[in-house]
Image (cartoon, helix red, strand yellow):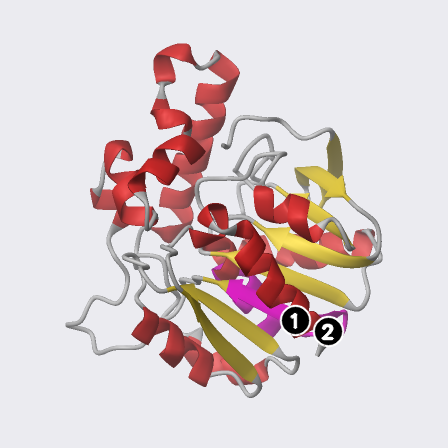
Amino acid sequence: MFRTAFPEKIDVAGASIELLTKGEGSPILFLHAGHGVDADDALVERLARDHKVIVPSHPGFGASSRPVGVTGVDDICHVYLDLIEALDLRDLIVVGVSFGAWIAAELATMGTGRISRLVLIDAVGVKVSDRETRDIKDIFATTVEDIPGLFFHDPEKGKASFGGFDFKNMTDAEVTRFVRNRESLLLFGWSPTLYNPKLLGRLHRVKVPVLLLWGADDKVVGVDYGRRYAAAFLDARFEVIEGAGHYGYLEQPDAFAARIDTFLAA
């Protein structure tokens, strides 16, 4: 994971964004999780069977540049608003995972004129409890060795997905990509930890159908958090997938893609 540079670049809003495009059909904008995304992401491959899937690396992630003024998730959203217009994307399906789902939710509150559906997978981004209750696991207090057990239902699948973090056998470019992703996630999600305190109260502005998919064994943001997240939208479906953790879409890409297909066909 997170190792492969993408073949395309596009300049928008003062940023040079690396871009991967796969498949043909109605467009999907796929917004990746905080660890980054690789060119052979299994869920992207599955969605590309029936759709044109556009996968940017967020500003500051992968090989995408980060202009000095891009310091928050709202800034990323404005870059993506420009990207959507630059690519003239319409009737767009936005699929976001974890940190990418936070971006997707914020993006949709800014206007849904070009968006037709929204899919959020194990999303972070909102505060649903009181100030003394932690809703989101402090992932910044964990080591890379903790990630398989924390992010996956099956830690062995987690180790396989991330190559065991064998930095000694990674190229300099691969290590740089990993470090940039980690650094940027810290910048955008450090304080408060992975949420915007104002976002929950803005979700009613999303005027398109929303599907929230959740791993039953999500140890980062639990199922109850997901249900309360879904309740803030005007038109949302919430579905739980058994045998899946926070990164369940990597453990069971076919199961997640099948739920998305059903939602889009409804």
Magenta highlight range: 102-120
Coordinates of residue 128 in the picture (x, y in percent): 31, 77
Q: Residue furthest left?
A: 132
Question: Cβ–Cβ below 8 Å for labels 1 and 2?
Answer: yes
Task: Return the residue at label 1.
Answer: 262
Left or right: where does residue 127 sit relative to residue 229?
Answer: left
Q: Is 230 drawn above or below residue 30 in the view shown?
A: below
Residue in the image at 44% along x and 29% along y: 178
Quarter-of-image position of residue 243:
bottom left
Coordinates of residue 13 in the picture (x, y in percent): 69, 48
Residue 113, magenta (yes or no): yes
Left or right: where does residue 26 sit relative to residue 157?
Answer: right
Coordinates of residue 65 in the picture (x, y in percent): 59, 35
- Marks 1 and 2, how far apart at CA: 5 Å
Nearest the viewer among 213 and 225 is 213
Residue in the image at 37% along x and 63% along y: 195
Nearest the viewer among 160 and 108 is 160
Residue 127: tell me if it is visible: no
Task: Return the residue at label 2.
Answer: 265
- The residue type indicated by label 1 comes to Thr
